[in-house]
Image (cartoon, rainbow, N blue to C red):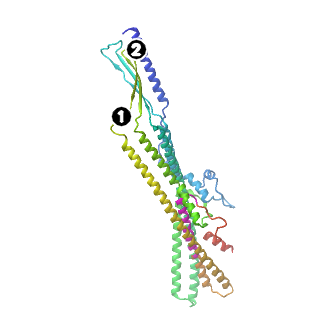
Amino acid sequence: MSWTGGTRMHLTRSFGQVSLTAAVMACISGCVAYHAAPLDPTASKAAFESRSLNDPALRKAVSGPPTLPTTRGPAPAVWDFDSLTRAALQLHTDIAVARAHLAAVRAGRETAAELPNPTLNLGPEYTFNPGGISPWVLGISFDIPIETAGKRQIRIAQARALSYAAGYELAEAAWKVRSRLRDALAEYLFSREEAQSWETEAAGRAAYLKVLEARLAAGEAGRAEVDVARVDLLTARQSAVAARGRSADADAKLAAAVGVTLAGLGDSRFVWPGLAEFSPLNEDAAGRLQSAGLLNRLDVRRSLADYTAAEAALRQEIAKQYPDIHFQPGYLFDQGENKFQFGFSFVLPVLNQNRGAIGEAEARRAELQQKFLALQAQVIGDTESAVARYRSALAELEQAKSEIRLIEGQLNAGKRALEVGEQDRLTVAGLELQYEVAQRLRLDAVRKAQTARAAIEDAIQRPMPLATPATRPAQPATTQAVANARREE
């Protein structure tokens, strides 16, 4: 080997080592380091149990619920439906899961926009019987992929559509949290009113039985009449116990709907001023609600986003019929001779033209199309059914109010007659029992109307307006309000 050839060989080898080392260091410097994130069930359990509506930071985050006036000690927080919904959106694990899913899908948009990396090929050889000035053959080449038919742009569009769909999933999760909280808070308040109603009726039946027993002792009533009154009293007391049990179950369901433990509710008070206030629903309003559901429901919008992603997937499979080009430049040091290479390669679509994958993508798009049409039909059916139940519940509620007004008039007249000695106590006690039973029937009608209104909201996935001041009923909203009004009189 001559001095010139040896020097050239040494310089070439040194240049190759330096280039390879620089390339490797550049790749390593751009790598992301791994950070462990182990799960600790004990710690997560303790963190969940520490959540509380009494947390000052939570109250500040949700603009702070008002407090009840008190003369001693700290006042418990009063949460209405709106403030409690904001707290649930901060605390509930379903929201955290949906946010994490959205972040994962959005990360896919960065992946979709990335360009494919080139490939570096190294192939050193040693010749035992060299014909040239050096026994070494050193080769270096690159494989640079070039995507065709707009595959990258289609991939980005698909990732964007999937990101939109995940965003609607987060909004859906928020709506479901609100929906469950709405039902749980309504049941929490209704169950307490129901328990109080049964307790009030039990007290009234006890008074009624006492009057009957006095009449029995005086020979003015029969044993059978007293026995029936005693059975009615036992039934009312048992119903009150059962209602208190349902109220305790409602406490646990409310805590779960908020995203805290039962102890996490703390000493908070819960109110819903518009719970028993309802607006009439005419045909025009019902039609607007149905249109709002067909166009603005979150799952409808998510379905449209999924369909857009499916169309992008079909376009991607069609684009794959056109093979990508691989540009393959290289350098070869062949026993002292410098050679440069320029090559191209691509897949020959001779055995298949990606027809199978295209067919699958078309079928998937057709499936999502039918699911979208089925969802719209479901929205129409759910809305019409909920509107019909709402109107029926309002009619039942109006009938219950009419019965209350009638019985209340009779009761007031009976009390006035009792004061002047023109009516006996037993008749007045019977009217009081009728009034309490009518109040519980009104409460059942209010519960049905609220359930129907909730069904309308879920059908259109939008809050339904409460009664306006002009349409609010003149009757007290709850049994508690009626009792308070009677005490004030």
Percent x, y for residue 394? 57, 70
Q: Residue at image x 34%, y 13%?
A: 132
| Outermost residue, bottom side | 219
Number of residues whose C-alpha sits closer than 10 Å to that of mark 2, classed few (under 14), some (14–19) or many (20 or more): some
- The span picked out in magenta is 438-463
| Residue mark closest to the camera, 1 vs 2 | 1
Task: Give the dominant element type of the magenta stretch: helix, strand or loop.
Answer: helix
The correct choice, above or below, for 113 with respect to 222 in the image is above
Q: Residue at image x 36%, y 10%?
A: 1
Residue 448 is one of the magenta-drawn residues: yes
Residue beneath label 1, please?
A: 348
Residue beneath label 2, please?
A: 9
Q: Residue at image x 58%, y 90%?
A: 218
Image quarter of the C terminus:
bottom right
Q: Is residue 215 left or right of residue 356?
A: right
Most foreground residue, 62 or 131: 131
The correct choice, above or below, for 424 with respect to 468 in the image is below
Percent x, y for residue 370? 44, 54
Q: Quadrant of residue 345?
A: top left
